[in-house]
């Protein structure tokens, strides 16, 4: 009877452990391996117990074979757990371990490990087979290798993690050795005492006990949720069973007295309805009772995280975020106080943003350098982002005394801080949360810490966004002030510029008019001298006079351009629109420039329109000036090859173009070409007299005609084409 109680106890404890591990993360490789090991232990414990309880030799043989089959699974999954948990490089040989496990199971199934199974004095015994020793060695090596991997990790570990590993190793070592001795070695030495042999099963209590000690004292895992659910489930089963028994008896008596018969079916139906209706309310009530008396700060993590996420992502007010974080945490954990500190880069401190509850001592700022020392120390252990728990820091200090940790412990105890939660935004620590002890005296569970770490990440992002928003708002206000100031200054400057521009235009206009008269006179008298009106001049004066005449002509053109610019900018450019034959205009320009093209040996051509073009409303002189300018430029900047003028009728427009095989244009030159005083790169080497005003004037003239002017070129030395296009009014 005692053995059965021990068996039930072991199965319940292992089942609870399996449930918790599975709920923690069934997809995690360590959790999966540990869960499979626990399942194998539960099945092995059942088989091992009942193989010695049955008196049927056939059943006993089957159970014994299952006993020897589950054994390798236990040791294999144990080894796999150790390898994946410590991330050992030996895991790359996992397929070999698995192959050996399948091999020895094969030997068990085909009777190469145990034989001659029989009862002797009431105890099941067997003879070792040929591969019994090989079977024992494989199991022993799995356990030893797993413990070796854990022990090696223990030697490298630091602080609390090292203590956790120590207790787990001791529990596994004692349980594993007891199992091997009582199930493999003692039977071969003639020991058949059932109580002694079952020490292998009961020895698992060492693993459970020491692991539970690590859980409860050193926070290896968190079993509070399991305890609560187990308590609720156990009491629920007991109450339902008791109610079922009492009500079933009462109904049986009632039906017997009423009808004179006892109806089991009717009793069952009524009880099933009562249980179905009462199960959920009873479960809810029991959960409330256990939460009220055992877990005073119980909450639903998913609902809490959803609430925090919803609030922190929908506000950009820093103080609203602060109030929500402080009040929300105190509401959840019912702790004595919560304080929030944020990094102030300018002052080099963590300044208190706010707190809630009763703090033990006043603390407004934390020196950044001091906390950085603590953070760097924890970083060496890979724990700089972890929540700092006061009791765990004390345990670390016990095993690794250090002045920095001593300082941290003293400060936490002085201010009665239980938890320090760092607020990291990527790799930057932007703030710190301090939580005091729970009013109930409970410790912060692993679930609490996980929730706090998730909330800390959300809070860091929300606080950073709020700070950036505040900075942007202040910057926008400052920028608005600066813009208003600059706008006023610009308005004043603009008025001054307009005055200067007007003065400039007037000056150019006056200067141009003043220059125009004497230049015209100079040109007239030079022409008369050249033509001999004042008598025959010596031949040696012909060339100088010709050059002076050309220079005078260029100055006159420049003055005319400046006058046009002045008229355009002042809005005084006058246009004399009349019906104009564009084809005749183009032919006239072609005839005038023919001599100039022949001098450069260029192939000069005018392609007339194939469709008749009706007369357009144009300023004939100004359009002729534009066509002349474009064609003249093409001839000037084309050293060899061709220049082609073309006029064509499109669907609803007339297009004139000048194509040449000259220097061409780069893509970045084209947008600048129609600006004032702008010339293409390098053209001054070809034609030095250009002013950069011709295309600007041409563009303004064409736009006043509601036309369009543009240029296309495939690149340097690939020629170019200038286009003018006028819409045909219907």
Image: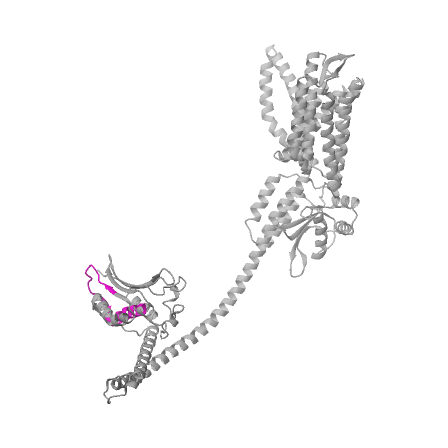
Q: In this view, which residue lies farthest toward the front?
A: 539
Instruction: Give the quarter of the image for residue 545.
Output: bottom left
* Number of marks present in the image shown: 0
Position of residue 372 in the picture relative to residue 608 (left or right): right
Does residue 263 appear in the picture of this structure?
A: yes
Q: Residue at x 19, y 63 (%)?
A: 614
Q: Quadrant of the N terminus?
A: top right
Q: In this view, which residue lies farthest toward the top?
A: 260
Position of residue 722 in the picture relative to residue 207 (left or right): left
Q: Nearer the viewer, residue 555 or 341?
A: 555
Q: Nearer the viewer, residue 294 or 1?
A: 1
Residue 88, position in %: x, y?
68, 37
Q: Nearer the viewer, residue 498 or 584?
A: 584
- The way the protein has been coloured in the rendering is one colour
Residue 573, position in %: x, y?
30, 73
Judge whether 362 appears above or below 439 on screen.
Answer: below
Instruction: Give the quarter of the image for residue 298.
Output: top right
Magenta stretch holds residue 345: no
Position of residue 465 in the picture relative to residue 365 (left or right): left
Judge whether 46 appears above or below 336 on screen.
Answer: above
Residue 148, position in %: x, y?
74, 35
Magenta stretch holds residue 612: yes
Q: Quadrant of the C terminus?
A: bottom left
Does residue 239 appear in the picture of this structure?
A: no
Q: Which residues are magenta?
A: 605-634
Q: Nearer the viewer, residue 384 or 30?
A: 30
Residue 3, position in %: x, y?
76, 21
Judge whether 617 appears above or below 433 on screen.
Answer: below
Instruction: Give the quarter of the image for residue 638.
Output: bottom left
């Amino acid at each position: 009877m005692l053995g059965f109680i021990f068996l039930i106890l072991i199965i319940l404890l292992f089942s609870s452990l399996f449930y918790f591990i599975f709920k923690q993360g069934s997809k995690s490789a360590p959790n999966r391996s540990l869960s499979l090991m626990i399942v194998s232990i539960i099945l092995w414990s059942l088989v091992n117990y009942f193989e010695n309880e049955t008196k049927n030799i056939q059943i006993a043989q089957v159970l014994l074979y299952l006993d020897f089959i589950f054994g390798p699974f236990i040791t294999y999954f144990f080894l796999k757990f150790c390898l994946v948990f410590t991330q050992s490089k030996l895991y790359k040989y996992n397929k070999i371990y698995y192959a050996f496990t399948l091999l020895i199971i094969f030997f068990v199934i085909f009777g190469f490990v145990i034989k001659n199974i029989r009862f002797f004095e009431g105890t099941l015994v067997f003879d070792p087979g040929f591969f019994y020793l090989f079977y024992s060695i494989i199991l022993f090596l799995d356990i030893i290798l797993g413990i070796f991997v854990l022990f090696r990790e223990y030697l490298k570990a630091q602080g609390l993690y090292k203590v956790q590993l120590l207790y787990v190793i001791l529990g596994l070592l004692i349980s594993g050795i007891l199992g091997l001795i009582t199930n493999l070695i003692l039977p071969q030495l003639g020991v058949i005492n059932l109580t002694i042999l079952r020490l292998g099963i009961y020895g698992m209590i060492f693993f459970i006990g020491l692991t539970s000690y690590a859980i409860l004292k050193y926070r290896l895992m968190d079993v509070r949720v399991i305890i609560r659910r187990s308590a609720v489930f156990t009491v629920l089963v007991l109450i339902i069973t008791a109610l079922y028994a009492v009500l079933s008896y009462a109904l049986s008596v009632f039906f017997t007295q009423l009808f004179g018969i006892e109806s089991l079916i009717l009793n069952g139906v009524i009880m099933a309805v009562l249980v179905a209706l009462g199960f959920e309310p009873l479960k809810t009530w029991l959960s409330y009772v256990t939460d009220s008396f055992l877990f005073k700060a119980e909450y639903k993590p998913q609902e809490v995280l959803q609430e925090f996420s919803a609030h922190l992502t929908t506000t950009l007010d820093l103080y609203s975020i602060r109030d929500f974080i402080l009040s929300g945490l105190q509401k959840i954990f019912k702790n004595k106080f919560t304080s929030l500190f944020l990094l102030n880069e300018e002052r080099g401190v963590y300044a208190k943003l706010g707190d809630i509850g009763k703090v033990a001592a006043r603390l407004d700022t934390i020196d950044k350098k001091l906390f950085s020392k603590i953070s760097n120390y924890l970083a060496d252990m890979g724990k700089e982002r972890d929540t700092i728990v006061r009791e765990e820091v004390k345990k670390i200090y016990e095993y690794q005394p250090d002045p920095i940790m001593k300082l941290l412990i003293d400060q936490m105890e002085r201010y009665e801080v239980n938890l320090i939660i760092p607020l990291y935004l990527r790799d930057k620590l932007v703030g710190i949360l301090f939580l005091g002890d729970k009013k109930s005296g409970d410790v912060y569970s692993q679930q609490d810490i996980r929730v706090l770490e998730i909330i800390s990440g959300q809070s860091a992002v929300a606080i950073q966004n709020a700070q950036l928003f505040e900075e942007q708002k202040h910057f926008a206000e400052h920028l608005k002030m600066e813009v208003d100031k600059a706008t006023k200054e610009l308005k004043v400057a603009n008025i001054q510029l307009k005055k200067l521009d007007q003065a400039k235009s007037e000056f150019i206009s006056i200067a141009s008019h003043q220059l125009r008269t004497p230049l015209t006179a100079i040109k007239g008298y030079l022409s008369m001298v050249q033509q001999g009106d004042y008598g025959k001049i010596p031949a040696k004066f012909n060339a100088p006079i010709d050059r002076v005449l050309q220079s005078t002509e260029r100055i006159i053109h420049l003055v005319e351009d400046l006058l046009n610019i002045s008229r355009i900018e002042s809005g005084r450019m006058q246009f004399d629109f009349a019906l104009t034959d564009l084809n005749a205009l183009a032919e006239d320009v072609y005839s005038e420039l023919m001599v100039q093209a022949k001098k450069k040996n260029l192939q000069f051509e005018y392609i007339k329109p194939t469709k008749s073009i009706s007369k357009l409303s144009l300023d004939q002189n100004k359009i002729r000036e534009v066509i002349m300018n474009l064609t003249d430029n093409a001839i000037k900047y084309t050293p060899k090859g061709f220049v082609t003028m073309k006029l064509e009728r499109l669907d609803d427009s007339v297009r004139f173009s000048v194509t040449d095989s000259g220097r061409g244009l780069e893509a970045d030159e084209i947008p600048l070409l129609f600006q004032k005083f702008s010339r293409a790169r390098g053209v001054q080497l070809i034609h030095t007299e250009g002013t950069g005003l011709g295309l600007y004037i041409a563009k303004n003239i064409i736009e006043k005609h509601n036309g369009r002017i543009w240029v296309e070129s495939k690149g340097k030395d690939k020629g170019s084409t200038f286009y003018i296009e006028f819409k045909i009014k219907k």
